[in-house]
Structure formats: structure tokens, C-alpha cells
Image: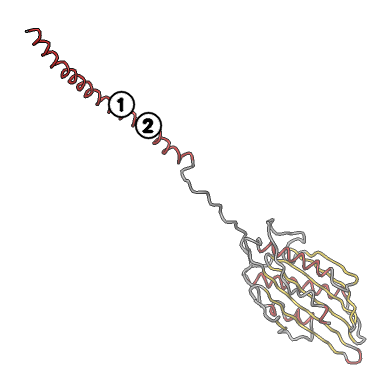
Amino acid sequence: MQRAAQRYDRAQRGPRATRLSRALVCAAAVPAVLITAACSSDSGDAPGKAGASAEPSAGGGSAQPSVKPSPTVQASVFRKLPEPCKVLPKKTLGDLAPEADTDGKKGSGDDTANRSSCSWTSLDNNGVKGSQFRWLNVSLLRFDSDTSRGSGNDQAHAYYTRQVQDAKAASGAKNTKTEALGGTGDEATAVRYDLKKKEGAFKQQTVVARVENVVVTLDYNGAGLAGDKTPDADDLTADAKKAAKEVVTAVASANGRAAQGSSPSASPSKGTSKSPSPKGSASSGAPKKG
């Protein structure tokens, strides 16, 4: 009977004791799981944080794309042009066009900051002996620096080259001669030729000069009309070259600078440019004035 009671007691205590033991084991296991989970969480976060902090340094500290600087060109040296009808002294006008009004005739629609021109017409009538005709024209063209077209000097050089080629290729020209000039701006060329017209035999002189970003085109022609003698081409060319130098000086002076002549081979600084094609060259109209 006593043994039965003991077995009963063991049977009652056994499951409860077993459950208690399991509970204690589980309770003890929970902190260990939490600690393990915590450790696993910390160790799992570390690479992410390290990767996040390392990523900017690998990219140079900025995720934004680099911005290329805008291209620049050399600024234009000359910012304005002189009054075209005042670029030559009265003495010079008296020598080249003695019967002309010294005030000259200014080109219409001129923007004096960028393009201008002036002409003088002289007719010395000698009655039955004929008359001496002279026509003088000065054309000025200034180029501004531009990132798409290049520096003003480069544009002016391209235009200067075209003006010289146009003068050499004048329609109906005979006995064409070309001379590179020194001491007239940065580069200069004189072109002379004979031109036969119904009024008489004309002697044409064209001097093209570049000084920095400005191109000067001086046209000078003369003829003996109604039986008068044909003027000497050498004299006309000498007068044209002298006048061109004075115009170059006037351009520099208008911008507060002294004109500095250089060798004929001088050229502007190298640079990629797309040169414009301005119209209205005086040289193409010079012979028509006869």
C-alpha cells in the first residue's frame, strides 16, 4: 500500500517535474537565442554600413556627373571703328582726290561699331584736253570673338585672305600684280591691275590690311578721260599704300592704341574657327565707279 502511494506520488511529480525542467531549460535558452540573434544582427549590419561608407569614396565623393567648362576664346582687341570719312588727313585726300569733297560720302546703313565705309570722287576737268578721274574708297570691317566662330583675329584673317583673292580675281582685270606689304598692320597686300572700260583705261589699286580683329580695304582707281593721258600706275599704287597705313593708324588710335606694323608673313594665333562671310566689300565696286 505504501509502495503504491509512493508510485502515485512519483507519477504525480514526474510530469510536473519534467515540465518544470523543460521550462527552465527553455528559459535559459531564450537569452542565449536573443544574444545570438543580436550578435548576428550586428555582424550582418556591419558590411552594409561599411559598404555604404565606402561607396562615396569609390565614386570620388560625388554621384553627380562632371560638368565640362565652357570653351573660351581670346577677347577682341579693338572694340570700335573710327569715323570712316575721317580716317584720312585732308592733305592725303588732296593728293589722291584733289577735286573731291573732303567730307566724303559715307556708306548707307553702316553700323560704325562693326562695319563702315566712305568714298571720295574727283573729276578734274581740263576742257577739250580731257579730264582726270579718281575714285577712292575705304571700307572697315570689325570682327568680335565668338565661341562658335573663333577669335576676332582668326575671323579677320580669314576675311582678309578672301578679300585679297577677290581682288586678284577681278573680272576683266589685265596685268595683275600682287605685292605683300610690311609695316601696315599685322598683314597687308597690294593688288593692282588694268581695267578697260568704255570711258577709258582705268588703273585699279586695292590694298587689303588686317590690324588685329579689323580688316581695312582701300580701293583707289584713276583714268584719263576724253583724251587725257592715263595716270601712272606706280604713282597710284604708292599713294594707295601710304593711305592704307594712315587708315590702319586711325583704327588703332580710335581704340587708344598705337598701330604696330609687322612683317607680311604675320598671322593670327592658331585656333579652330568658322569664319563668317560678310558682304559688301568695297573692292568689288571700285571699277564700277568709273
Q: Earlier in the sequence, mark 2 or mark 1?
A: 1
Q: What residue type is labelled 1?
A: Thr
Dividing the image into 4 quarters, which one contains the N terminus?
Answer: top left
Is residue 68 rendered to the left or right of residue 214?
A: left
Percent position of residue 67, x then y? 53, 52
Percent position of residue 282, x then y? 76, 75
Determine which residue is flagged by label 1: 36
Give the CA separation, mark 2 to mark 1.
12 Å
Q: In this view, does 197 lie above or below 25?
A: below
Residue beneath the point at 34% across and 31% down: 41
Q: What residue type is labelled 2?
A: Gly
Is residue 219 rendered to the left or right of residue 251?
A: right
Q: In this view, does 228 lie above or below 87?
A: below
Which disc, if any, is residue 44?
Answer: 2
Q: Which element carries disc 1, helix, strand or loop? A: helix
Q: Which element carries disc 2, helix, strand or loop? A: helix
